[in-house]
Amino acid sequence: MLTKDQLLLMFLCAILSTVQFVRGTGSKLTVTSATLVLLLFGSALAPLAQAADELEVVIKGIEGDLESNVRAHLSLSRLVGDESLPSVSRIRYLHGQAAKEVSAGLTPLGYFNSHVESELEQTATGWRAIYHIDAGPRARVRRQELSVTGEGADDPSLTRWQSRPALQVGAPLDQQAYDAIKAEVLERAAGLGYYDARFTQAQIVVDAPDNSADIRLALDTGPLYRLREIRFSDAPVREALLARYSTLETGDPVATDQLLEMQRGLVDSGYFSGVEVQPLWDEADEDRAIPVEVYLTSNKRTAYRFGAGYGTDTGARMSASQRRRWVNDRGHRMESILRLSEVTNTLLFNYEIPGRNPVTDTYQGRASYEQEQTDSTDSETWAVGAQDQRARGNQSWHWGLGLEQETFRFGDDEQSTMLLVPEGGWSIVSTDNRLNPSRGYRLSIDLSGAAESLLSDTSFVQTQVSGKAVYSLTDDLRVLARADIGATAATDFGLMPASRRFFAGGDNSVRGYDYKELGPEDNEGEVRGGRYLLAGSLEMDYRVAPQWRAAVFWDSGNAFDSLDTPLKNSIGVGGRWQSPVGPVRVDLAHPVEDGGFRIHFTLGPDL
């Protein structure tokens, strides 16, 4: 775009050239023609000379929601920041519409007697529009006429809206809240099975001189639709199993929430790649009972997964799994998993049977082999077992029975132990965001034991409590705390296998130390694990970029046989990258008592 200085220079050059031409001819006709040329040339340049480079809109006298709503209605405000602006004549026209647009922005919030003083001034860089706005007094609700008729007239869920503050006499008039209440009521009615619900009257009658308004809302819920049957399309599992994914029974109201819950459960089951739930309102009988059609698209029966990675606890690692999403028409599932790393190798077979509520309840049978080798311990464990798992909301429970045969060695001392272990546990997770929480907590409690009189080489009782919490002090600063506590009572602790002993150290324990490096030692200085565990961490991290955080931390803990054993401490700094699958952490930790440094790499959610 040409600048004003450039345009002015062109205009002057044109004048000089024309005058020179006139002098050379001495013709009166030529002078007149030259004058016409100047006028035409000048009029052609005038719109360009007046073009605006930048536009600024200043609003004074109001703020907050009022200002935001007014800006949303102002045509000039929507042009701010555009690379190319319209002609000055267009800008002047839009400026002239501002009074009406300001009024349109204030009216939905209850202001009907506003006054606007406007200015449009030219600046060195373009134009500035200034609006001095006096919103005036806000209108209030003078009278209300609210009613509910139909079959749902006595349903508290469909009458509670009448007590909403925005609808009460004396309340400031807010049309946006009024519209939101109407939409919410209709959505709620449909969700409860009142498919034909509608407002037979919905009015706001404004008395602008009086700064008041009358609200009239009449809801007719219509009839309540009930379930006649649920029909499933062809599926690889029995219809009796599919029906257990629904909490609706024949004769129940057709509640949208429950239909969506059934749809989510069927999708999460893994049996299907697509699930569509369609209430057939047009097939209602004289009692307003309707069928619900569920269209199912079967998933691939077998899924394969492969992975590779690195962690400072495990070293290089890889995994492979095969999952049969259904083994038979009863919906049983089976999975085989192989995990290999520099420290631990695992082969696991898992068989799942859906429980009475297949969304939350599962019976599992498993068989596994695990080999682990650390600096001080070698172990091989064969295990079979069964477990009942239940989930309710954000809580879960499990209990089961397992038979374990473990051969383990501390230094040159090799032992073998068999245990029949009943066990159970409970956990709860509460968070606002599982992958990137600003606040939340996780707590788990596990209890296990064995008795020599029941196929076990030793008797013991063991419990472990683990917890973690996240709390944001500001939008960018978080505090994270972690604690792990464990205790064992055994008739002969020397026969306790390595997998049932407590160790400390590693990425998720006391950083600065190697995986399972801390614990009671034997006469040869080999760590052999302890009866008790106490470990904790306090960490602060700060957001330095949208996906990056810097952290400082202090870890403390140990595994021990005697309660007067001192704890090991470490301090350090770290960085976190918020990846799509959770934070990737790199920490540099310094053991306070033993000196040195150790780097830790971890991946996974904070809770």
Image (cartoon, rainbow, N blue to C red):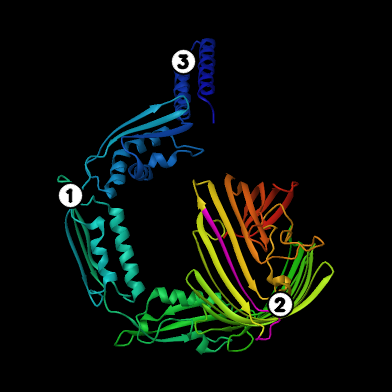
Stretch of the chain drawn in magenta: 453-470
Q: Amino acid at mark 3?
A: Val
Chain-order first, disc 3 or disc 2: 3
Which of discs 2 and 1 lies nearer the camera? The answer is: 2
Gap in angstroms between the C-alphas marked 3 and 1: 69 Å
Q: Give the total of numbered labels.
A: 3
* Image quadrant containing the C terminus: bottom right
Give the quadrant of residue 417: bottom right
Main SS class of the magenta portion in the image: strand
Q: Which mark is residue 348?
A: 2
* Label 2 to label 1: alpha-carbon separation: 72 Å
Tell me: residue 117, above or below residue 541. Answer: above
Compared to 256, does 289 lie above or below? below
Furthest residue in direction right, as rendered: 412
Quarter of the image where the N terminus is located:
top right
Please check the rendered image and state whether residue 465 is part of the magenta-colored stretch, yes or no. yes
Is the residue marked by circle 3 packed among few (<14), some (14-19), or many (20+) residues within 10 Å? some
